[in-house]
Amino acid sequence: MARKKSNRLHGHYCKICGEYKANEKFSGKGHAAHICKACAKLPAAEKAERETITRLMNLPMGRLSESQKKWLKNRTQDSRPEVSALAREIYNAHFPHAERNAMKKQLLINNLEFEVHTDIYDEYGDEWEVNQRFTADRKNRELTMTDFDTGKAMEIAIDGGKMSKLLRWIVHTLEIFMWEQDYGLGPETLDPDVDLSPDFYDEDETFSADEYSAPEGPPCWRVKVEYSNHKEQEIVSVQDFLDDRPEEVYCELLSFFGVDENEMFFGD
């Protein structure tokens, strides 16, 4: 009767290089310490760094224990660049929303300015053109709405709790601080039909990306945020539609002014 082959790796494991080696590659003391002869000769600092990297690479792909999670998180702040970079990569793979959640705790909106210049569609597919600006001031508890088409402006004072809830919702639920990344919006939006590759132009001609900016006129939407930690953020979109989360902000801000959809279509 044939024996079932074992999946056990042959040799002895070295915790520094992470390899299984023949027993003769280990000294008696090294065998007990799980350090091969080659790794034992390394300087102490290099030995410690390699051991940490090996441990990082051997972390399970699935769920981590609390002690493993704590150890991994501490390594993301390691003073050794290679260790900290690898630890952050692994931590982000295990906890993809950890960075966002950490940022949420640090961000509190003081002032918000939000403009919309595009067509809005309701649930029935009807549309109306919007050219409006909203501002929210947390300290003064004031909301304003300016309609550029009519020239009318409205200003209302709201309860401090409602203002805090509104601005917290924009950060914690809609994650406004990540819109630039989530919607692929950089500081400049180039015409996608313009080829800036070197082969596109004659050798004597020189062009720069600055010559190809977004279309003229107001952007589809623009948001400017000032946070309590003095961080400022401005995001501009020149797409021809309102993205989902900016649309949620628009509808929520509009609701504070008691504007009915019929008023948007037909006026007063």
Image (cartoon, helix red, strand yellow):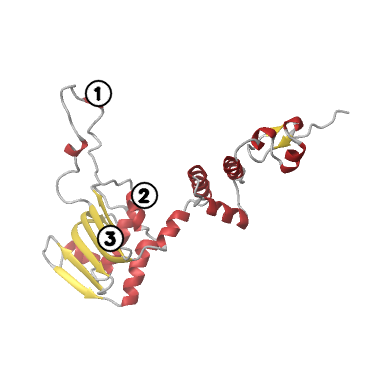
Residue 258 in which image quadrant: bottom left
Query: In this rendering, is residue 51 above or below 146?
Result: above
Q: Nearer the viewer, mark 2 or mark 1?
A: 1
Residue 12's mark?
none
Closer to us: 88 or 256: 88
- Residue 69 in percent (x, y) is at 58, 54
* Residue that label 1 marks: 199
Circles 2 and 3: CB atoms closer than 8 Å: no
Label 1 element class: helix
Residue type highlighted by circle 2: Asp
Query: In this rendering, is residue 249 above or below 183?
Result: below
Residue 182's mark?
2
Q: Residue furthest right?
A: 1
CA gap between label 1 and label 3 equals 40 Å
Q: Nearer the viewer, mark 2 or mark 3?
A: 3
Label 3 element class: strand
Decide if residue 123 is in sight here: no
Residue 225's mark?
3
Q: Residue at x 21, y 36 (%)?
A: 209
Q: Residues within 10 Å of mark 1 (few under 14, many from 20)?
A: few
CA gap between label 2 and label 3 equals 17 Å
Residue type highlighted by circle 1: Asp
Position of 234 with respect to 169 (left or right) is left
Q: Residues within 10 Å of mark 3 (few under 14, many from 20)?
A: many
Query: In this rendering, is residue 131 above or below 82?
Result: below
CA gap between label 2 and label 1 equals 31 Å
